[in-house]
Image (spheres, grey):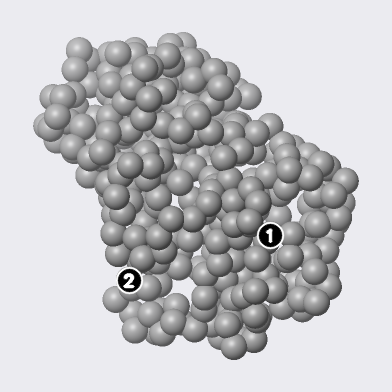
Amino acid sequence: MPLNRCIALPLAALVAGTAMASQASAAEELNIYSARHYDSDEALYSAFTEQTGIEVNVLEGDSDQLIQRLTLEGEASPADVMITVDAGRLWRGEQEDIFASVDSAVLDERLPAYMRHPEGKWFGFSQRVRAIFIDPTEVDAGELTRYEDLADPAFEGEVCIRSSNNIYNQSLLASMIAHHGEEDAEAWAKGVVGNFARDPEGGDTDQILGVASGQCHIAVANHYYYVRLVNSDDEADREAAEKVEIIFPNQKDRGAHVNVGGAGMVKGAPNAQNAVRFLEFLASDEAQALFATGNYEFPAVETVETDGVIASWGDFKKDDLNVSVLGENNPEAVRIFDRVGWR
């Protein structure tokens, strides 16, 4: 069956409704609100339709905008599933009470406990590691093995990292709060600010390119941005990737910080049974492989094999802190960023 795609409109138009709303509640369909914007996700929807015969309708938009839409729509919403990235955004949806709890033996068996909300309100289906990148000609990897080391005064003026309004950094700081407490986490954030090579600017790719160009010697970014450079059709991107070295931190203690691409069933979903089938499909070997090949994310199901650059890294230790904690600690992380002047 064909995949119907709707691109999110300004909020006023969203409240008024779209053609998608008129399609809701058909016997064999599934309505998804998605804040993921990867072409590879279409392969997930097509594979689900091929396997089940359930037609998938997708409305794409900004995560906060979609959460607000769901809140305004309430029980009249046609949405069955919401998909987004980062536990902080999933937590925001949880706070707005948009998710229904799902009890699934399949999801419990397939997904590690730390990738599942304790009450089944949402689930992580792909893993994103927040890695450290260095210029190996300027920085000894043996001296930078932990996130904590980013605050070491020895690295003053050497760190490129995104702004504090970036959800990835908020979740990283949320994990530091969980492991060290608020006081030590704030001291760490203050130390990192003291080591900035430049005012925060740009996205994750820009931080890696900052190292490659010599603007800084250390950067923090999600792993898949690096893999995109490695696999780019642009020779300049590939050359930049060759100049940096990736580090997966904290291998001797808690492991590298992991965040998620995740989804949950919307409360009052008109096609609830189909929603559960879709969530369970996302944990299948087929879907997990698509996450890995489509956007170079790590599968959440640990038995699914990877290939290419990701496979070449081999096994490494990942932090098994339940990702729901990253959302719970988000408000305090934002307050800490404000207090230490991380703009």
The answer to whether residue 21 is seen in the rendering is no
Q: Is residue 4 left or right of residue 109?
A: left
Where on the picture, by quarter, is residue 53? top left
Q: Is residue 114 left or right of residue 254?
A: left
Tell me residue 179's x, y (percent). 73, 43
Q: Residues under labels 2 and 1: Cα distance?
A: 27 Å
Front residue of this view, candidates 283 and 83 = 283
Residue furthest out toward the front: 252
**Are the two marked residues, 2 and 1, in contact with CB atoms closer than 8 angstroms?**
no
Q: Dot 1, how many residues are within 10 Å of its Cα: few (below 14), some (14-19), or many (20+)? A: many
Where on the picture, by quarter, is residue 182? top right
Number of numbered markers: 2
Q: Is residue 220 left or right of residue 339?
A: left
Q: Residue drawn 31% across and 54% down?
A: 306
Tell me residue 237's x, y (percent). 40, 79
Amino acid marked by disc 1:
Tyr
What secondary structure is marked by label 1? helix
Q: Is residue 31 left or right of residue 169?
A: left
| Residue assigned mark 1 | 147
